[in-house]
């Protein structure tokens, strides 16, 4: 892969044109670059990009004034032709090309309860050439009624795109969940007319809250979901009405995780654990015959590049630590594209975000641990690429810190994973203070190698950063994830403690200046680690944290459905005595380090009562925590101004308690100073 000698500055054109609406006098100027901590806390400028089926247009999501906008560029003229940037709370979410001049957008609401935009369930068609719009699904849709075939009409339901039907220029498949049903909702699949909004019901899911799989021809084949005991269930569609559980077929077991249905082969691609590592298999639906397609070590495949005509996998990605590709079909143009990009950008990783229907052009994202990422328009046949834009153009990769992967044995022998990032420019023998940064979740979530703005923010202020993919994390297979079930307060957090002690023994960080910081479950882990290892940490900070495990099955949005309550019972447990013993709220006397708590007032995932109860418990002990509440934020801080206020306070807190003038480690239970509110 070679880069063009004179790359087109499409990113500058896009951003300048978008900025013109707000800065008419500076039509050629890009938005001002942020400085200080805002370099990290501000949203990425360019978020995503996709090319139209025939390669006429490029659609790109960019952040304008802290909110996403969708820009359409004519690739022949390099001119901005239209912009979708509505006023108010509604804005662009995920989008999909339907035909060469029209996209369908899943609208989202910025005024939500999570750490980012929340879906409104509405689907909107937008024309690239002139920006013309039509509501296709949702409560603002208008039209007539029918029986099975329905015109565009208001619908109190959440809609999402399932398949854009590559061989059909007019229809797409969408799934919907009714807002009028409580708890676990059945999912309906519709064939939606993207011109009129009329729709015809295709199927009803065999299990509530299911997702659907289609084959290369757009035919519905599989459904996946969880039962109320939080067991995964997979179903094969037989005929127009019947569903059959996959485990009833030869060649499939409870360990079979389907990832694709290949109609031409009458086979399902599944991922399963092997003695060591994982295998991608093709399993015949009729005979159960199995063929091993690929084998990965440590981590199962996470992303797939597929042939458009057959859906067969040509390349796959896994992430044992640094992401790696396995090429299954070396002669396929997309596999050659991946190989070429990796060769052209050594030390980086690539993702193919979209291709034209003839695979002539593609959009790729190139990124690394120090490079926030750049988008490329690739001519697949010519093996040439030109830049489209940068994720964070104000970041200089050479000024960022390197992320080092590790695999170590925990204190009980289980192999755990993570990353250590050291700040740049350390003097010989210097040992920086350490921030331990456990991720949220905890299940189904993990830290990845790549640019992490929070890690780089802390490293820029002189902190080393430790990220631990403790047992229970996603991305390493079911056994690794289930090893953390009902072990939140002890074994999971002990992995964080074990990794911290390993980092100190490694001799590159100052073991006397360690603080724990996290969000959601990560906030819980930060507090609980400080309780389990009071000799190890100088301070602890929690953002949108869980601090009372006894309420998880009855409070917050996870408890609103039977599947959610089943998850809590299976993953967290229901023994109240054990949950109290593992909850920081009831063990505040053992939390002897300075604490800083931040929370959003509109958080439905972990209601603010979690933070308020921990604050009250610590205050009653004479150790009031540092305190920050953003009343309009949800589960995490999305607004740029609110996020900057949070991290300004957080850095001040960390520097106050890890700096060279900070006091000695407090004894457990002793009164400690806290950051002023």
Image (spheres, rainbow, N blue to C red):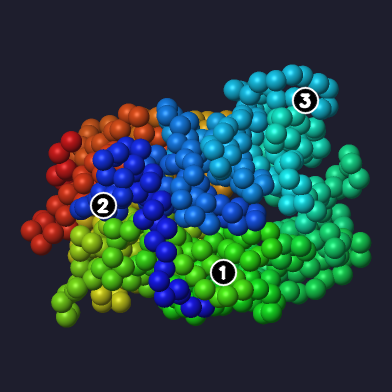
Q: Quadrant of the C terminus?
A: top left
Q: Quadrant of residue 289?
A: bottom right
Towards the viewer: 391 or 551: 391
Q: Mark 3 and mark 1 in contact (Cβ < 8 Å)?
A: no
Where is residue 283? Give x, y as percent: 82, 66
Q: Quadrant of residue 500?
A: bottom left
Answer left or right for 677 relative to 9: left
Question: Disc 1 and disc 2: Cα gap in Å?
Answer: 31 Å
Q: Secondary structure at mark 1?
A: strand
* Residue beneath the point at 65% across and 56% down: 54
**N-terminal label among 3 and 2:** 2
Answer left or right for 507 relative to 147: left
| Furthest residue toward top | 144
* Residue beneath the point at 77% across and 64% down: 310
Dot 2 crowding, Cα within 10 Å, few <14, some 14–19, many 20+: few
**N-terminal label among 1 and 3:** 3
Question: Can residue 351 be seen in this snapshot?
Answer: no
* Residue beneath the point at 68% across and 71% down: 314
Where is residue 73? Give x, y as percent: 49, 50
Q: Quadrant of residue 267?
A: bottom right
The residue beneath circle 1 is 379
Towards the viewer: 60 or 638: 60
Question: Disc 1 and disc 3: Cα gap in Å?
Answer: 42 Å
The residue beneath circle 3 is 150
Where is residue 42? Give x, y as percent: 31, 48
The residue beneath circle 2 is 33
């Amino acid at each position: 892969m070679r880069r063009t000698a004179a790359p087109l500055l499409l990113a500058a054109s896009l951003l300048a044109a978008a900025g013109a609406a707000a800065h008419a006098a500076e039509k050629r100027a890009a938005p001002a670059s942020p400085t200080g901590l805002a370099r990290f806390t501000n949203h990425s400028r360019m978020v995503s990009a996709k090319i139209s089926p025939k390669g006429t247009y490029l659609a790109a999501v960019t952040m304008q004034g802290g909110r996403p906008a969708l820009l359409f560029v004519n690739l022949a003229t390099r001119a901005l032709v239209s912009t979708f940037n509505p006023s108010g709370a509604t804005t662009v979410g995920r989008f999909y090309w339907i035909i060469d001049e029209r996209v369908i957008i899943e609208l989202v609401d910025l005024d939500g309860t999570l750490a980012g935009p929340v879906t409104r369930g509405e689907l909107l068609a937008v024309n690239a050439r002139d920006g013309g719009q039509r509501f296709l699904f949702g409560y603002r849709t208008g039209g007539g009624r029918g029986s099975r075939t329905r015109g565009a009409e208001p619908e109190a339901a959440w809609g999402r795109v399932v398949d854009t039907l590559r061989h059909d220029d007019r229809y797409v498949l969408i799934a919907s969940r009714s807002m009028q049903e409580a708890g676990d909702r059945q999912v309906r699949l519709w064939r939606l007319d993207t011109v009129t909004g009329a729709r015809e019901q295709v199927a009803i899911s065999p299990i509530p809250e299911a997702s659907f799989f289609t084959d290369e021809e757009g035919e519905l084949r599989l459904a996946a979901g969880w039962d109320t005991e939080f067991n995964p269930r997979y179903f094969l569609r037989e005929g127009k009405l019947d569903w059959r559980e996959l485990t009833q077929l030869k060649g499939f077991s409870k360990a079979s995780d389907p990832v694709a249905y290949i109609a031409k082969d009458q086979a399902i691609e599944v991922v399963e654990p092997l003695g060591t590592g994982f295998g991608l298999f093709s399993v015949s639906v009729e005979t159960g015959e199995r063929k091993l397609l690929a084998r990965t070590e440590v981590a199962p495949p996470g992303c797939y590049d597929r042939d458009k005509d057959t859906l067969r996998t040509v390349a796959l990605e896994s992430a044992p630590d640094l992401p790696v590709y396995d090429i299954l079909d070396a002669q396929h143009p997309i596999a050659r594209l991946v190989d070429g990009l990796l060769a052209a950008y050594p030390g980086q990783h690539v993702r193919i975000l979209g291709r034209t229907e003839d695979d002539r052009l593609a959009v790729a994202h190139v990124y690394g641990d120090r490079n926030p990422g750049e988008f490329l328009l690739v001519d697949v046949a010519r093996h040439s690429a030109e830049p489209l834009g940068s994720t964070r153009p104000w970041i200089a990769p050479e000024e960022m810190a390197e992320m080092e992967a590790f695999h170590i044995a925990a204190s009980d022998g289980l192999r755990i994973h993570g990353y250590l990032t050291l700040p740049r420019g350390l003097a010989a023998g210097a040992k920086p203070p350490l921030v331990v940064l456990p991720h949220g979740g905890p299940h189904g979530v993990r830290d990845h190698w790549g640019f992490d703005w929070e890690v780089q923010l802390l490293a820029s202020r002189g902190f080393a950063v430790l990220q631990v993919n403790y047992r229970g994390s996603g991305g390493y297979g079911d056994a690794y994830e289930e090893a953390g079930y009902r072990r939140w307060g002890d074994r999971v957090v002990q992995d964080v403690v074990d990794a911290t002690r390993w980092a100190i023994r490694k001799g590159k960080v100052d073991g006397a200046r360690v603080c724990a910081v996290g969000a959601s479950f990560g906030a819980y882990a930060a507090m609980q680690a400080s309780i389990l290892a009071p000799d190890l940490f100088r301070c602890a900070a929690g953002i949108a944290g869980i601090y009372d495990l006894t309420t998880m099955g009855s409070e917050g949005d996870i408890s609103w459905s039977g599947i959610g309550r089943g998850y809590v019972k299976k993953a967290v447990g229901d023994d109240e005595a054990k949950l109290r013993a593992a909850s920081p709220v009831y063990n505040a006397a053992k939390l002897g380090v300075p604490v800083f708590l931040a929370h959003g007032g509109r958080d439905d995932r972990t209601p603010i009562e979690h933070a308020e109860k921990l604050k009250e418990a610590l205050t009653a002990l004479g150790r009031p925590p540092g305190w920050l509440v953003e009343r309009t934020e949800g589960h995490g801080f999305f607004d740029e101004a609110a996020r900057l206020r949070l991290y300004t306070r957080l850095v001040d807190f960390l520097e106050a308690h890890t700096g060279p003038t900070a006091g000695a480690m407090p004894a457990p239970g002793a009164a400690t100073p806290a950051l002023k509110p």
